[in-house]
Image (spheres, rainbow, N blue to C red):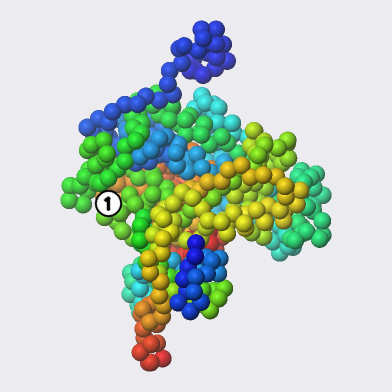
Amino acid sequence: MLITCPYCGPRDVIEFTYQGDGNRERPQPNSQDLDAWNAYVYDRLNPAGDHNEIWQHSGGCRTHLRMVRNTLTHEISSTGFARGDHNAAARHKAGGKS
Amino acid sequence: MAEYSAFSLLTNALKGNQDWKPAWRKPDPKASYDVIIIGGGGHGLSTAYYLAKEHGITNVAVLEKGWLGSGNVGRNTTAVRSNYLLPSNTRFYEHSMKMWENLSHDLNYNVMFSQRGCLNLAHTPAQFDDLARRGNAMRHLGVDAELMSTAEIKRLVPALDMSASARFPIVGGLMQPRAGTARHDAVAWGYARGADRRGVDIIENCEVTGFLRDGDRITGVQTTRGEIRGKKVAVAVAGSTGRVMQLAGVDRMPIESHVLQAFVTESLKPFIDTVLTFGMGHFYMSQSDKGGLVYGGDIDGYNSYAQRGNLPIVDEVMSEMLALFPGLARVRMLRSWGGVCDMSMDGSPIITAGPLPGMYLNCGWCYGGFKATPASGWCFAYTIAKDEPHAFNAPFTLDRFYRGLVIDDKGQGATPRLH
């Protein structure tokens, strides 16, 4: 499987680390909403078909990617930066409050 | 008299083998059943068998979308062991081991259970200490475990590279002598015949396409062969758990589906007579009765419902094999294949009533479901019949993740690709 990194171009899958379901939302670090934390840590969408997921180009530029990959055919229909929309904490940081 | 015996073999042989009955019927589905089991794999079939045998519930249908044994029960590497660290896992898998020891007799079907032992290798003194700790935990609960020195390992598996110049020198190992292998197809066929003879309908080529509901309650299933009503609907579909639960409206689960590959070489003369696992990566191997080396490694590492794997893992598994057995460098690989595993968030299974009323769930087997086949069906049948878990499966609930009661033998956390 080839993954097209926005910085580095098409690279072999062995350069990448899988970080799983990209639909999860990480609560704010000071959140005390236990249900939200449980859902973030343990619950996954697990579709047979298009799957929105996070990868890291850990053997390359180390950027985090958000991509849509088909879990039946491994076709990748979109790849982009995960930065900014990765989770609530990242958005907080992007807003310049940290 | 048992249907299969030396006497029946002889009389049928003399009569030209005309009188054998098919091992299971091919019935059309009835309009309703007391229990519908979705999934005609090892766990679904053993659940049906123990529902009939232990609880007298025989108005049962097992629905299989393909043919019997086409899923993971026919795709695994057949190892059976109970060498776990945590008590709830040890008790459950040891119960399974005891059932394996009597399974051929119980089913009147030879599952070729061969207690050839399972040896985990240690490659550093710290890892050897860790194996000693696991062995002690096992012995504490009455499970057999023995530490092995390098001299003993060398005698047992002469083909291993035991030299100090090996890529990962071997410093010792932990042996479970009662572990071993079984013929996986025979397990499916034996349970199917046992259930069928007790009145269970095994319905192949019958894919579930939706659930019938009365409010929240599950009251049956829609299938490619029509609607079937069931007082209780049990789901035992392993890698397809995500897909089937989605049909019931449960989108999010503590499960990811990953593909695991397995490999077999051309037939060799007797080479290794135990199940061997590598300690510096994920690799395990045994030799089949036909002579092929049966081996496998890690899952591919990202969600997949494709029953085929990627090449980087092939490369990794082969290099692990050669790190242990340089002498196998020129042996040819005969076949490789993949199966879809339901990886849970703590590496342990789920056998429970729910999550919807009228539904029962058996999943989360990661890539260790084969050895659990007898106990999984036995516990699931108990849970379905009595609407409460047996002590053996009481810890394996779905809500343990949210209650701080995870059973994480490897201590990896909620990262399924690492379990």
Q: Which residue lies at the image location 72% right of the left edge and 47% below the top edge? A: B330
Above or below: residue B403 compared with residue B386: below
Above or below: residue A72 compared with residue B179: below
Above or below: residue B8 compared with residue B39: above
Point out residue A80 in the picture as x, y percentages from the top left corner.
40, 75
> Callout 1, which amino acid?
Ala
Q: Quadrant of residue A93?
A: bottom left
Asked if residue B251 can be seen in this view, the reply is yes
Point out residue A64 in the picture as x, y percentages from the top left corner.
46, 76
User: In the drawing, does residue B318 fall left or right of residue B25?
Assistant: right
Residue at the front extreme? A9
Point out residue B76 in the picture as x, y percentages from the top left corner.
53, 44
User: In the drawing, does residue B34 fall left or right of residue B260?
Assistant: left
Mark 1 is surrounded, within 10 Å at the Cα level, by few (under 14), some (14 to 19) or many (20 or more) other residues, namely some
Asked if residue B80 can be seen in this view, the reply is no
Q: Quadrant of residue A31?
A: bottom left
Badge 1: chain ID: B
Secondary structure of the residue carrying numbered label 1? loop
Q: Quadrant of residue B291?
A: top right
Instruction: Name the residue beneath numbered marker 1.
Output: B248
Q: Which residue lies at the image location 43% right of the left edge and 27% below the top edge? A: B194
Front-lying residue, B166 or B375: B166
